[in-house]
Amino acid sequence: MQLAKDLILDDYYKLRISSKKLSSGRYQVKFFATIQEEKQLYGYVLVEAEETLKSVISRIKKRLKELDYGYECNHLHLYNVGQEPQPTNLMIFE
C-alpha cells in the first residue's frame, strides 16, 4: 500500500493522513480529522501492506461516525453481541 505523504479529503470529516512503513511490513497511518470545524481529533491505525487507501479511509470514517453518536459510543459493543470481535487496530485521541 502506497499512501500519499499527505492526503486531504474535503467532506463532513476533513481528513489528513500520512503513513510510515514499519519493519514488520505493515503501515502505521496517522490521521488528523476535523469534524465540521468544531472538533479536532487525531489517531493512528495499523494496516496491512495489501490494504487499499479506500478501505483505510472507510475504516477511519466508520469509527468517526460511531463517535459522533455521542452517548451511544459507550455501548458500541452491544451492536455486535454474538459476533466474533474484529480487531480494529485503531486509536483516536482528542
Image (cartoon, grey):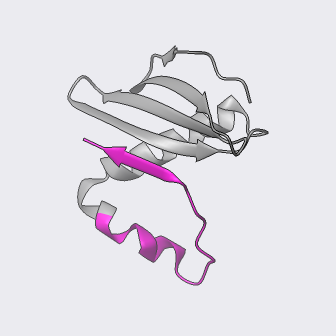
Of residues 43 and 79, the one drawn nearer to the viewer in this rendering: 43
Left or right: where 11 falls relative to 84: left
Which residue sits at x=32%, y=47%?
68
Q: 67 above or below 50?
A: below
| Quadrant (top left/top right/bottom left/bottom right) for the N terminus | top right
Q: Position of residue 4 (x, y in %)?
A: 62, 16
Of residues 55 and 26, the one drawn nearer to the viewer in this rendering: 26
Q: 62 above or below 37?
A: below
Residue 39 occupies quadrant = top left
Q: Position of residue 51 (x, y in %)?
A: 74, 40
Residue 25 occupies quadrant = top right
Which residue sits at x=42%, y=50%?
91
Left or right: where 38 falls relative to 17: left
Residue 20 visible in image: yes
Q: Position of residue 22 (x, y in %)?
A: 63, 38
For this orientation, the residue located farthest to the left is 38
